[in-house]
Image (spheres, rainbow, N blue to C red):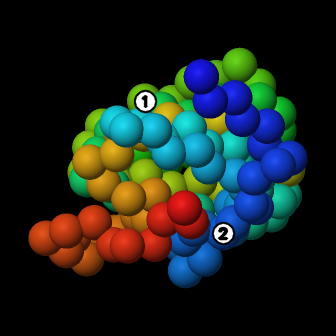
Amino acid sequence: MPIYRFEDLKDVRQNPGLSSGHGESIKGERMYFCHRIWEAGTEAKPHYHACEQFIYIMRGRQKFTMGGEVHELGPGDVIHIPANEVHAAEMIEEVEAIYVKDTTWSLKGVAAGETAPDAAPPDDPF
């Protein structure tokens, strides 16, 4: 039974062109489990993923935009992002979050307005 500790894993910035978030990731057979930190005043630019994603905010506040709606989110909030839904965030405070995605796509997002490649980009830090 694999047991992981985030402090034993590599801290990586998977999407430096789209997001200031960095942290550790675990990849299973069918899902990713990721820990991320975004500094206050930084952002995740509008982007999408070819798979759905859940984000659980542990600490900090952010303005989250999806589907033309803007919400201020904080500790305890869970965001469900459907596949191919453009989303973005502005960090009001330093934000720490956990997110879970399926492995049908890599951890790398696609900038809003761009067409996703036929196959997931090979950018995983594993």
Q: Residue furthest bottom?
A: 17
The amino acid type, in three-letter code, at marker 2 is Arg
Residue at coordinates 45% horizontally, 58% vertically from top-left?
A: 107
Expressed as whole percent of the image width and height from the top left, the position of residue 33 reads: 56, 38
Q: Position of residue 50 (x, y in %)?
A: 25, 53
- Residue 21 numbered mark, or none: none
Q: Residue at x 34, y 36 (%)?
A: 30
Q: Quadrant of residue 2?
A: top right
Q: Residue at x 54, y 61 (%)?
A: 126
Are there few (<14), some (14-19), or many (20+) residues within 10 Å of tag 2?
some
Marks 1 and 2: which is nearer the front?
2
Q: Which residue is mark 2?
A: 13
The disc, 1 or 2, on the residue closer to the chain's N-terminal end is 2
Say whether residue 91 is visible. no
Question: What secondary structure is marked by label 2?
Answer: loop
| Residue type beneath disc 1 | His
Q: Nearer the viewer, residue 121 or 75?
A: 121
Q: On screen, 108 above or below 93? A: below
Residue to which mark 1 is pinned: 80
- 110 versus 10 height, above or below: below
x and y percentages locating residue 1 in the rendered image: 59, 22
Instruction: Give the quarter of the image for residue 123.
Output: bottom left
